[in-house]
Amino acid sequence: MSKLRVGILGATGMVGQRFISLLENHPWFEVTTLAASERSAGKTYEEAVGNRWKMKKPMPEAVKSMIVKNVNEVEAVAASVDFVFSAVDMTKDEIKAIEEAYAKAETPVVSNNSAHRWTPDVPMVIPEVNPDHFEVIASQRKRLGTKRGFIAVKPNCSIQSYTPALDALMEYGPKVVVATTYQAISGAGKNFADWPEMVDNVIPFIGGEEEKSEQEPLRIWGKVIDGEIVKAQSPLITTQCIRVPVTDGHTAAVFVSFEKKPEKEAIIKAWKEYKGLPQELDLPSAPKQFIKYFEEDNRPQVTLDRDYENGMGICLGRLREDTVYDYKFVGLSHNTVRGAAGGAVLSAELLKALGYIEAK
Ligand SMILES: NC(=O)c1ccc[n+]([C@@H]2O[C@H](COP(=O)([O-])OP(=O)(O)OC[C@H]3O[C@@H](n4cnc5c(N)ncnc54)[C@H](OP(=O)(O)O)[C@@H]3O)[C@@H](O)[C@H]2O)c1
């Protein structure tokens, strides 16, 4: 099987770098085109990134001498790839327009950006939870006038630490959810060298994050009606999102009440048995065991557990009954792997397996 040719929009940024690392030696996809702003265009990738390489693994040899293209030269980029991953940092309107331009150039876009998360016919998917939402691609293609081009997005990094955990318990009708997230600084594209104020500090505000954390799970649990995603009305979700001095890994402390309160053992069993299409299809980036439940009181811990299943799994622990809500627990997920580039790569694998992305 020849590999699909992939372009990365925003290749020089932190999420773009994560895409490059994750796609090194990918069995289905080969990075053939890198694009960024006009500041980087025309330089080799190594020159364009300069001292900004933030991954633990060194820059792959295969990309070092690639000449970076300009994201805004859509035809030139689209001509050399079968699909693109998008991780550009532009205004919301600019991102919406550029992603649509790629889709209209018959180049599917799997995006890490938030710009299209509420466009009614754009699927926002956690591959294990709501792959059925990909069916709106047919109406999106009709609107855009395309045969193969479309946009698919992944949800915000903050919701991954609790949304799959609650999805596994849907038969019990979660009705009220209170979640406080403790979010890593890489979620802002930063490390401690760029953001020294975060050393020994906690900042109780992340712009726009609480709205995303409360609303995006409802869209994930929504239904496709007449070619659009209509969001679910429940559970009621309230969140507080806090920045903490951690490099990678978002933790969530969650309280939940149900219509039908389950036994603790039933919850843990549902978590252990939870799986979806990525596991059934044995996709290359799918975690074998999506959710891991820890019995130890001091787990999950960021440094010990964020890389569980190569950063693609969700770690849960400390499930116990609560005095105000039915239960409380703690969740952890890797924000730049499952929560960003890794989630997008898994979505692209599923889109390929389902026939939505093919060679041009
Ligand atoms: N960091 C995370 O964990 C995370 C998680 C979820 C979502 N996101 C979202 O993902 C996107 C990328 O985040 P990031 O942290 O990787 O940002 P970043 O490190 O600042 O990188 C931004 C990328 O966009 C390019 N770019 C900037 N302005 C541009 C323009 N006018 N035209 C074309 N390209 C332009 C940059 O190219 P140059 O190098 O040439 O300037 C660079 O490749 C953002 O929208 C962010 O909100 C980030």
Image (cartoon, rainbow, N blue to C red):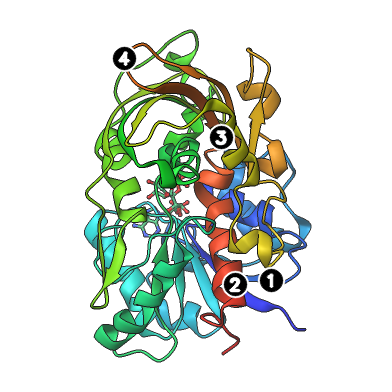
Left-right relation of 267 to 280: left
Earlier sequence position, callout 3 versus callout 4: 3
* Badge 1 density bin: few <14, some 14–19, many ≥20, Cα 10 Å: some
In the rendered image, residue 341, in percent from the top left (x then y), is placed at 55, 52
* Badge 3 density bin: few <14, some 14–19, many ≥20, Cα 10 Å: few
Q: As rendered, which of 125 and 293 lies closer to the eye?
A: 293
Question: Taking 21 as reference, is 2 above or below it?
Answer: below
Q: Quadrant of the N terminus?
A: bottom right
Residue type pointed to by label 3: Ala
Does the CB distance between marks 3 and 4 fall below 8 Å? Answer: no
* Badge 4 density bin: few <14, some 14–19, many ≥20, Cα 10 Å: few
* Real-space Cα separation, disc 4 to disc 1, in angstroms: 51 Å
Q: Which residue is mark 4?
A: 324
Earlier sequence position, callout 3 versus callout 1: 1
Question: Taking 42 as reference, is 158 above or below it?
Answer: above
Residue name at image x 62 percent, y 42 percent: 53
Q: As rendered, which of 359 and 289 lies closer to the eye?
A: 289
Residue type pointed to by label 4: Val
Does the CB distance between marks 4 and 1 fall below 8 Å? Answer: no
Does the CB distance between marks 1 and 2 fall below 8 Å? Answer: yes
Earlier sequence position, callout 4 versus callout 1: 1
* Badge 2 density bin: few <14, some 14–19, many ≥20, Cα 10 Å: many
- Numbered disc in front, either 3 or 4: 3
